[in-house]
Image: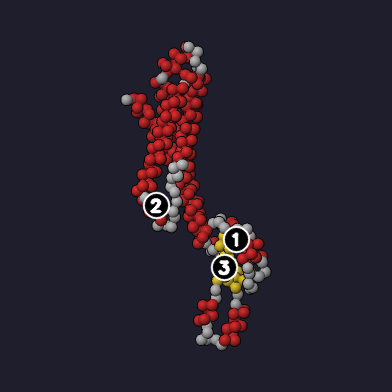
Amino acid sequence: MKSLKNHISLIVALFTVLFSVQIYVAVDRTIDAYENRLKNDYSIIVVANKALTPVEFKAMDSIIDRSEPIATDQVLQRLQGEMSKKNLELLKLTLPKFYRIYLSRFPTPDEISKLQKRLQKDSSIERVEGYAQTHDTVYKLMLLFKDVVQIFSIAIAAVTSMLILKEMRLWQFQHADRMSIMALFGAPVWLRSAVLFRLAIVDAIIATIIVCLAFLMIEQYGWMDLLLRTVGITIDLFNFVQDGVRSLIIALSVSIVLTFTIVIGNDEEE
């Protein structure tokens, strides 16, 4: 019963590490998807004194993906009853050209500032509006949320690793007699500690399976997908091939490294 309790403790500790890592990965994917959505919605307004082609805009900065003119026909139509046709034609010729510029990625505040300066260096561009204040607020909130989740995940991983070390020391004490007998017969350290490595590997595999099942349940009920769809985001919270393999590698690495640390520490004491 005591051995089973130790197994459960290690499995829970490994599950906590894997779950926190996967939460960070899911948050990172969510932010990337949200950045992509903002990139598609975000645009910069440019006022020019002459017609500019998409090729000319792209030549100004590599971050520019495409440009499209903003039609002024509606404004001119409203003035048809108030101005003569001749004056309307003159106004149409003298009216500045308006363009909407879309970027290849969601820019940082520094990138927006540099882009505005590059665009304004062109003599044909009179004004650039990047809506920097609104952009900065959204971008900083996204980075803050990502940093908080990252710090939280690192803290959980650090505390949990200490708990795993404690559980492995208990395993070592439980198997001390067997390991001492094997040492008397001249067995090398790795062979004497094989039982510890075997238990650690088995628990790592079990913890990985539980994490996969947990995220399967989350996706099955779909409540997280529903929350993400409310802000127009659709992502895979858990990729059972990519994320499952990564979780297994992390679990095995943590278990084996910590077990190796215990074994080496005990060998040095002897």
| Dot 3 amino acid type | Glu
Which disc, if any, is residue 225? 2
Q: Which residue is mark 3?
A: 68
* Residue at the image position 62 percent from the left and 79 percent from the top: 93
Q: Earlier in the sequence, mark 1 or mark 2?
A: 1
Separation (CA) of disc 1 from disc 2: 32 Å
* Residue 40 appears left or right of 60: left
**Mark 1: few, some, or many residues within 10 Å (few <14, many ≥20)?**
many
* Residue at the image position 57 percent from the left and 67 percent from the top: 68
* Residue 113 appears left or right of 81: right
* Residue 41 appears left or right of 174: right
Q: Which residue is mark 1?
A: 64
Separation (CA) of disc 3 from disc 1: 12 Å
Q: Earlier in the sequence, mark 2 or mark 3?
A: 3
**Residue 18 quadrant:** top left
Q: Position of residue 64 (x, y in %)?
A: 60, 60
